[in-house]
Image (spheres, rainbow, N blue to C red):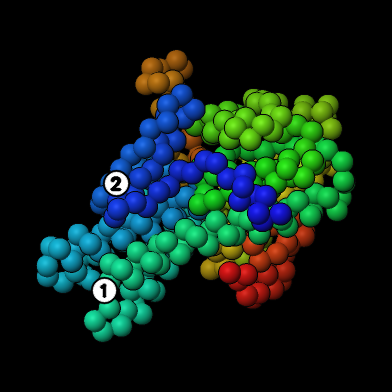
Amino acid sequence: MRERLLAAEKVKSIEWLDGRLNLLDQRKLPVEEIWCSHDSAASVAAAIRDMVVRGAPAIGISAAYGLVLAVRARIADGGDWRQALEEDFKVLADSRPTAVNLFWALNQMRERLDRLKPGEDPYAALEAQAISIHDSDREANLAMAQFGVDLIRRHQGNPQNLLTHCNTGALATGGFGTALGVIRAAHLEGLVERVYVDETRPWLQGSRLTAWELLGDGVPAMVNADSAAAHLMKSRGISWVIVGADRITANGDVANKIGTYQLAVLAMHHGVRFMVVAASSTIDMALESGEEIQIEERAGSELLEVDGRRFAADVEAFNPVFDVTPADLIDAIVTEKGVVERPSAAKMAELMSRKRLH
Ligand code: MRU
């Protein structure tokens, strides 16, 4: 399947070229395809904060390249570049709080710095580390697609209706996608009747990004209002809800885009299976449960305005952009290390003790 998936790769949103980080501006899609070029950690941090690049793995990869840009600038400035680099670590870490991939990637970069040998070029070492983070995310996507398809096929071998939330495809990752990677692979295997795509208020990652990716792949897709999910499950024979994750804790709780938790509750009620797809870089074994995850809250204007024009009453808005799905509502967590069914702390620990496949 690996070769078929690689042949089906089309979209990418992150490009490291000639010492600059180019990001496809996801705020403009699908109307315009505009690339922004970044040459400093501050500019990469702003791109993450302002949603030019979004999706947990894509944020982590971008932050790693941000550090590469930072080390070059700090060395050129002279003085104690290691000390000065701490500011860049902080600026990047402060860009968004919930997706652990950001902190995981920065940690990988710090560990690489700590392993520098005397006389080794820090820029070359960090550049190689960032490229390796990017490449291994791409590989993880391919492995997860295979595991996810196997899981779908094990339960039912004929074409099925799937429901997904937010964007978890090539735009959100370094490769084929997490949840959308499984869905795209399932389509290639003839296992998809139709994909229902939650529009995903307020940023509309579903209707703007996921639908665009699925159309590009020729996957039958329909967008629905987030609030249509219960009706969909009751009336359209959905067999799986398949979503990504921004942080998974040691007990298997999953933080993902706001609205994921209600989908899991609805899925349980309607007997629909619930699959989470995320690389092990999204698993945070330092946190015992989802209670400890910091949930990002963004400006109320994201709910009250369209294109900068207010349409709502003169009221305040509560705008948490992630929620936590408890492990006991999840049928399977699919990672590149393997699949955990009915997640528990013991099963998550066993998964994380397995060696990485690449
Ligand atoms: O706010 P966003 O667009 O960064 O949120 C993205 C999500 O919640 C995705 O579902 C999640 O990061 C999984 S991405 C492969």
What residue lies at 52% left-to-right and 41% top-to-bottom?
11
What residue lies at 34% left-to-right and 51% top-to-bottom?
17
Task: Please name the amino acid that badge 2 sits on.
Answer: His
**Residue ID for mark 1:** 121
Query: CA–CA distance between discs 1 and 2?
Result: 22 Å
Q: Are marks 1 and 2 in contact (CB under 8 Å)?
A: no
Numbered label attached to residue 38: 2
What residue lies at 40% left-to-right and 36% top-to-bottom?
25
Residue nearest the viewer, comparing 248 with 128? 128
The image position of residue 173, as x and y in percent, is 52, 49
In the image, is residue 358 above or below residue 263? below
Name the quarter where the N terminus is drawn: bottom right
Q: Secondary structure at mark 2?
A: strand
Mark 1 nearby-residue class (10 Å; few <14, some 14–19, many ≥20): few
Numbered label attached to residue 143: none
In the image, is residue 193 above or below residue 8? above
In the image, 282: left or right of 183? left
In the image, 172: left or right of 219? left
Task: Please name the amino acid that badge 1 sits on.
Answer: Asp
- The image quadrant that residue 71 belongs to is bottom left
The image position of residue 125, as x and y in percent, is 33, 71
The image position of residue 320, as x and y in percent, is 50, 40
**Residue 230 visible from this viewpoint:** no
**Residue 189 visible from this viewpoint:** yes
Tell which circle, 1 or 2, labels the residue nearer the N-terminal end: 2
Q: Secondary structure at mark 1?
A: loop
Disc number lying in front (1 or 2):
1
What residue lies at 61% left-to-right and 51% top-to-bottom?
6
Name the quarter where the C terminus is drawn: bottom right
Residue nearest the viewer, comparing 26 with 19? 19
